[in-house]
Image (cartoon, rainbow, N blue to C red):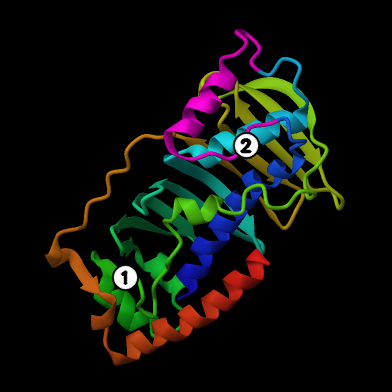
């Protein structure tokens, strides 16, 4: 369905925003590890020098450490607004490495709540959201889903697999070794009450990427801002390693996607195929 494309656009935008700087690594940054060891390693780096944890490091090296730290996270909250193809999108959700997530998304004046529990996703949108997300049979579907959650198990035609998969979102971080090489230090700032180092990269065509990296604790990415490009916007990252509690809605408030009726299911399936192609194009 078209909603799948919208979620994928968001995933692509924020993942690309934090993934690119890993290409700036000169080999002096943290190497990829796993589990608790990575978290302990980045914590050790962050606290090695009181007052100025990045003393002596170049902008590229700071970016490499920030990406290594962010990749080590077991969970995080992502919030902000982006624009893709001239269309504004808003997102605010918490996601973990086990596939659980909960939050909300907004597009074209509509809003929806999102939950994933195990391998099942639940979406509860208002009328404007569903009309924006579904290309056909909108009247029948929006009426049936009014005040209800749509249940979308993985493997179904309308499945949005990967939307709540933190591991998949950050899997490509650091693969491109050249895209964002050559960052510059900006003035220190504060994000969410926390002191941050500012890294800036100006790209051909007028696009600018600004990354804000935590100066206390692990050097996580706390904010990414893109301006001047086709996919602009600002996203904040917080609540690192905090548990994500996603609870399935009451059964009497749920409509299984397979029970939407033949015509509606056909519309969702067709839109899903179209959305998948569009999502692939965006991520290319």
Q: Earlier in the sequence, mark 2 or mark 1?
A: 2
Q: Of 218 and 91, which appears nearest the observer?
A: 218
Question: Does the CB distance between marks 2 and 1 fall below 8 Å?
Answer: no
- Tell me where residue 1 appears, x and y as whole percent: 45, 76
- Tell me where residue 5 appears, x and y as whole percent: 52, 69
Residue at 65%, 72% in the rendered image = 281
Q: Which mark is residue 152?
A: 1
Q: Of 139 and 33, which appears nearest the observer?
A: 33
Can you identify the residue that label 2 sits on? 31
Vertical arrangement, residue 242 with respect to residue 230, above or below: above
Q: Of 96 and 131, which appears nearest the observer?
A: 96
The reply, left or right, for residue 2 in relation to residue 284 is: left
Q: Which mark is residue 240?
A: none
Magenta region: which residues?
Answer: 29-53
Report how far apart the C-alphas of labels 2 and 1 lie in the structure. Answer: 37 Å
Residue at 54%, 41% in the rendered image = 71
- Secondary structure under tag 1 reads strand
Q: Nearer the viewer, mark 2 or mark 1?
A: 2
- Secondary structure under tag 2 reads loop
Vertical arrangement, residue 230 with respect to residue 227, above or below: below
């Amino acid at each position: 369905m078209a909603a799948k494309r919208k979620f994928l656009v968001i995933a692509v935008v924020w993942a690309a925003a934090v993934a690119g700087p890993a290409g700036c690594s000169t080999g002096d940054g943290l190497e990829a590890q796993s589990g608790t060891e990575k978290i302990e390693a980045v914590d050790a780096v962050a606290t090695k020098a009181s007052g100025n944890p990045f003393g002596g490091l170049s902008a590229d090296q700071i970016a490499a450490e920030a990406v290594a730290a962010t990749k080590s996270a077991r969970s995080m909250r992502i919030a902000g607004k982006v624009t893709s193809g001239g269309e504004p999108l808003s997102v605010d959700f918490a996601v973990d490495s086990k596939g659980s997530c909960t939050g909300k998304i907004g597009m074209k004046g509509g809003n929806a709540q999102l939950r994933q529990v195990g391998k099942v996703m639940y979406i509860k949108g208002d009328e404007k959201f569903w009309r924006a997300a579904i290309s056909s049979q909108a009247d029948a579907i929006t009426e049936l889903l009014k005040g209800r959650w749509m249940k979308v198990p993985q493997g179904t035609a309308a499945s949005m697999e990967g939307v709540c998969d933190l591991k998949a979102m950050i899997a490509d971080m650091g693969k491109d070794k050249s895209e964002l090489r050559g960052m510059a230090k900006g003035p220190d700032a504060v994000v969410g009450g926390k002191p941050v180092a500012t890294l800036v990269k100006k790209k051909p065509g007028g696009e600018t990427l600004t990354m804000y990296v935590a100066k206390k604790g692990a050097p996580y990415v706390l904010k990414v801002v893109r301006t001047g490009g086709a996919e602009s916007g600002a996203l904040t990252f917080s609540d690192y390693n905090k548990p994500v509690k996603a609870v399935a809605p009451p059964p009497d408030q749920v409509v299984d996607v397979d029970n939407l009726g033949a015509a509606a299911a056909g519309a969702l399936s067709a839109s899903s195929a179209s959305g998948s192609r569009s999502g692939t194009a965006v991520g290319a």
